[in-house]
């Protein structure tokens, strides 16, 4: 993915706990990309929900 493809995307900055566009902090500080500012704002909640789902799937797999 080129940087031109990332223009107009949103990122959650872990350093500042804010939503940024592509030209914000460096990639090692960010989670994303997201299509909307609202999606980026929920990044930590999205990660937590996915982890819960994956943990449940792993538990079911382990039997």
Image (cartoon, rainbow, N blue to C red):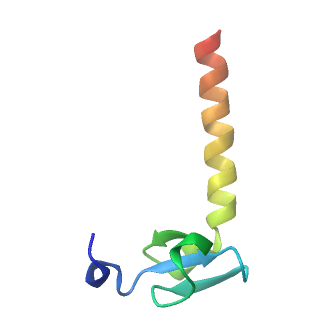
User: Which quarter of the picture shows residue 13?
Assistant: bottom right
Which residue appears at 60% of the width and 35% of the height? 54
Q: Nearer the viewer, residue 42 or 18?
A: 18
Which residue appears at 42% of the width and 81% of the height? 9
| Residue at the top extreme of this rendering | 63
| Residue 40 left/right relative to 3 | right
| Residue at the bottom extreme of this rendering | 23
**Vertical position of residue 36 compared to residue 62: above or below:** below
Disc tally is 0
Which residue appears at 72% of the width and 83% of the height? 16
Q: Where is residue 8 in the image (x, y as percent from the top left)?
A: 38, 87
- On-image quarter of the C terminus: top right
Q: Where is residue 31 in the image (x, y as percent from the top left)?
A: 56, 68
Q: Position of residue 2 (x, y in %)?
A: 26, 76
| Residue 27 left/right relative to 46 | left
| Residue 4 left/right relative to 38 | left
**Vertical position of residue 21 compared to residue 32: above or below:** below
Q: Position of residue 23 (x, y in %)?
A: 47, 90
User: Which quarter of the picture shows residue 4?
Assistant: bottom left
Q: Which of 8 and 25 is in front in this view?
A: 25
User: Which quarter of the picture shows residue 62?
Assistant: top right
Q: Nearer the viewer, residue 15 or 48?
A: 15
- On-image quarter of the N terminus: bottom left
Which residue appears at 61% of the width and 24% of the height? 58
């Amino acid at each position: 993915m080129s940087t031109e493809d990332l223009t107009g995307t949103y990122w959650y900055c872990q350093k500042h706990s804010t939503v940024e566009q592509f030209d914000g902090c460096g990639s090692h500080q960010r989670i994303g990309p997201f299509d909307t500012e609202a999606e980026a704002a929920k990044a930590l909640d999205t990660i937590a929900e996915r982890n819960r789902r994956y943990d449940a799937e792993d538990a079911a797999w382990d039997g």
